[in-house]
Amino acid sequence: MAPPTDRMSPEERRAGASLASIFALRMLGLFLILPVFSVYAKTLPGGDDLAMVGFALGAYGLTQAFFQIPYGIASDIFGRKQVIVVGLLVFALGSFVAAWAPDMTWVIIGRVLQGAGAISAAVTALAADLTREEHRTKVMAMIGSSIGLVFALSLVGAPILYGWIGMAGLFIMTGVLALAAIILLLKGVPPAPPPHGHEKLPLRRVVMDPDLIRLNIGIFVLHVVQMAMFVVLPHALVNHGGLEAAAHWKVYLPAVLLSFAIMVPAIIAAERKDKMRPIFLAAVALLVVVQSGLLLYSQSLWALALWLVLFFIAFNVLEATLPSLVSRTAPPSAKGAALGVYNTTQAMGLFVGGAVGGYVAQNFGDNAVFAACTGLVLVWLVVANSMNFPQRRVTAAATQTV
C-alpha cells in the first residue's frame, strides 16, 4: 500500500485537458461571433431590424436551455460520449447553415440548430465520471478556465479574423472546430464508464432536491449578474475609463489572466484541505463587494480594472466549484440529469441577465443595474450559507498502490 496521494492520475489529467479543449473549441466558435455579429448583420436582408439581430444572438441560448435536460438524461441512459458526438454534429450543422444563410431568417435557423447541440451537461457529467471527488473541482476549474480564456482571446481575435475571412468564414470555422472536437473526444478522452440506464430516477427528485435547488439558484444568479454587468460595463469603460471599444480587450485580457493566477491556489485549498464551504462563500461575498464597488466607485479606468479582476476571480472560482458540487450532491444514476437542470438554469440566467439588464439600464441607468446585482448576490449569499456542502469522500483509488 502506498500513502494517500493528492496528485491527479495520468488518466484524470488526460480527461481534464481533453474535455477542457473540447469545451474551448466549441466556445471559441461561439465567442468569435459575438463581437462582430451586429456589424455583419447589417449586410444581410433583415439585418437592419435590431429585434431580429437580438433574436439571432439569443436563439442559441434559448434552444440550449431547452435541450440541456434531455441531453443530460440521454447521457445517463445511452452514454456520455454518444450524446456529446450527436450534439457536436448538430452544432456543426447549425454553423454551416448560418455560414450559407442568405438572410437573417436562415441565420436564426442556424443559430437555433447550434443551440440544439447542447452538450454542456453531458461533458461536465463525463468529467465527473472520469475523476475522483478529491480532484473533481480541479478538472471543473480547467474547463471553466478554458471558457474564460477563450472569451478573452475572442475579444482580441474576432475583429482580425472577421477582416480576413468574413462572417461566413467564422461560421465555417465554428463547424470545423466542432468536428475537430469530436475527433478529440474519441481519440483523447479516456473510456467512459457504462451508462446508468438500468437505475432510473424520477426527474422530479432531481429538480426538487433542496441542495440542488440552492446550487441552481447560485448558477442562475451568477450568470444574470455576468450578463447584466456586461450590458453596461462597455459603456463605463468608454465614458469613465476613456477607453475606446476596440481597445477594451486591453482590460479584459489582463484581468482574466491575473484572475486565473489567483484562482488556482483557492481551488487547490478547497480540494486538498476540504475548505470548500469557506472558499465558496468567500467567492460569493467577493461578488457582493464587486457589485457594490461598481455602484459606488467606478469613475476611473483603474477602478474599473480592479473590479473586473476581482469579478473574474470570484466568477472563475464559482464556475469551477458549482458543477463539482452538483455532481457530488446528485445521485450517481442521475448525474447527467442534475447537470442538465444546472445547465438549463445557467442558460436561463444568461438570457434573463441580458434582457433584464438591458431594460433596467435603458429605463433607470447603469447604477440601477449594479444596485440590483448587489441585492441579488446578497440574496444568494444568504441561500448559500444555508446549504449542506457534501463532504469529500476519498476514493479507494486514492489510497491504493499506484
Image (spheres, rainbow, N blue to C red):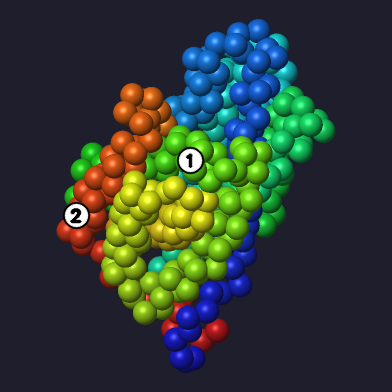
Horizontal relation, residue 240 to residue 273: left or right: right
- Judge whether 41 appears above or below 247 on screen: above
- Judge whether 200 appears above or below 110 on screen: below
- Judge whether 160 appears above or below 393 on screen: above
Q: Nearer the viewer, residue 39 or 197?
A: 39
Name the residue that disc number 2 marks. 382
Q: Quadrant of the C terminus?
A: bottom right
- Residue 17, image x, y percentages: 61, 61
User: Residue placed at 82% from the left, 33% from the top?
Assistant: 164
- Residue 204, image x, y percentages: 23, 39
Cα separation between marks 1 and 2 = 29 Å
- Residue 305, image x, y percentages: 51, 54
Label 2 packing within 10 angstroms: few (<14), some (14-19), many (20+): few
Q: Nearer the viewer, residue 10 or 108?
A: 108
- Residue 55, image x, y percentages: 50, 19
User: Residue placed at 34% from the left, 68% from the top?
Assistant: 279
Name the residue that disc number 1 marks. 236
